[in-house]
Amino acid sequence: MHQWTFVIAAYAVTLLGTAAVSLISWRAMHRAEAQAETLANRP
Amino acid sequence: MPYWPCRARAAKDAALMHRFANPARFLKIARPLTGWLFWSGLVLLLAGCTCGLFVTPADYLQGQTVRILYIHVPAAWLGMAGWTGIAVSALMQLVWRHPLAAVAGRAIAAPGALFTAICLATGSIWGRPTWGTWWEWDGRMTSMLVLLFLYLGYIALANASARQGAGQGGVSNVTAIFGLVGAINIPIINRSVVWWNSLHQGPSITLRGSSIDMALLWPLGLTLLGFSLWFGAIVLMRMRAILAQNKVEARMQRLARG
């Protein structure tokens, strides 16, 4: 295999992993904080 | 030093540490800090990766595959730094009963496990063209794999203890002890290439300097800092999520009681 194939594979694994964890963490934070705010505003 | 100034200093240190124990005070700092860490980290690591891929020269021996260095080294550093963070937060939880320490420990686990997995995957991809094999059961790779298993065990224990309501969204004392004991693997990973014969190269970046040429080394500083800032942002996001969930659960319980 060409050397660049290994480089691209390594960067792709890193990009996918970091993007997935960023998205999951942001969504969990956003959802929990929105829920907490809704409940706090409830009379 | 006389006895009473020592006591006074310990009390002062404890007061400083507990200053951010209040979630409201912590959130006041964490909210603006999350975005700053995330975006500055992203800019730095994109700059570092771009320079590492297109600006630096190929290595005379390894060719283009040396470019994996710019993601493999930060991943290894953050995998080990993450567990060190878990051990420190476990110590703070067990000794000083700091309420946010348990939340921090639980928040560090997932990004720590991710970077350990990335380190193993990129190391394996780098190993195939360099060593002629995807995997070798030597000291460095095996101890890093053990670290991944430790992370998975910690995540399972932390989730189980959170479900049982231990530590207000944090982790139980048993999980904290597991985090503390698991830290024994960190110096083993660090010294593995010195203690045992390995396909993995010896330590090339130490406190005394680096054996890597500066023409190849400089983008590594950018990716190391970038990934570290990004890691900090993810930990803050996860801590904020846990604290908000605690708030929701407390509010629901109050509503259920009428």
Image (spheres, coloured by chain):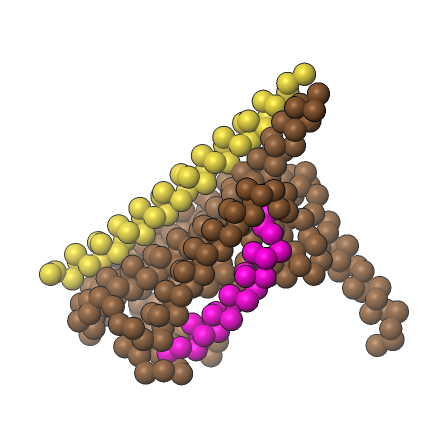
Chain colours: A yellow, B brown
The residue lying toward the viewer, choosing from B75 and B155, is B155
The residue lying toward the viewer, choosing from B128 and B254, is B254
Task: Provide residue B168's location: percent of width, then percent of height.
Answer: 63, 43
Q: What's drawn in magenta, residue-wise?
A: B170-193
Task: Provide residue B123's location: percent of width, then percent of height.
Answer: 29, 64
* Residue at point 58%, 43% (across, down): B164
The correct choice, above or below, for B137 with respect to B147 in the image is below
Q: What quarter of the picture does the C terminus of chain B occupy?
A: top right
In the picture, measured across the screen, residue B124 lies left or right of residue B238, that is left
* Residue at point 49%, 55% (across, down): B154
Task: Provide residue A28's location: percent of width, then percent of height.
Answer: 48, 36
* Magenta-span inclusion, residue B208: no
Whether residue B182 is visible, yes or no, is yes
Q: What quarter of the picture does the N terminus of chain B occupy?
A: bottom right
* Residue at point 64%, 18% (across, down): A42
Task: Determine the image quadrant of residue B25.
Answer: top right
Task: Provide residue B180's location: percent of width, then percent of height.
Answer: 57, 64
Magenta portion: prevailing SS class: helix
Whether residue B219 is visible, yes or no, is no
The correct choice, above or below, for B52 with respect to B104 in the image is below
* Magenta-span inclusion, residue B178: yes
The residue lying toward the viewer, choosing from B246 and B16, is B246
The correct choice, above or below, for B126 with respect to B3 in the image is above
* Outermost residue, left side: A1
The residue lying toward the viewer, choosing from B138 and B58, is B138
In the picture, measured across the screen, residue B163 lies left or right of residue A25, that is right
The correct choice, above or below, for B117 with respect to A22 in the image is below
* Residue at point 43%, 78% (across, down): B191
In the picture, measured across the screen, residue B250 lies left or right of residue B11, that is left
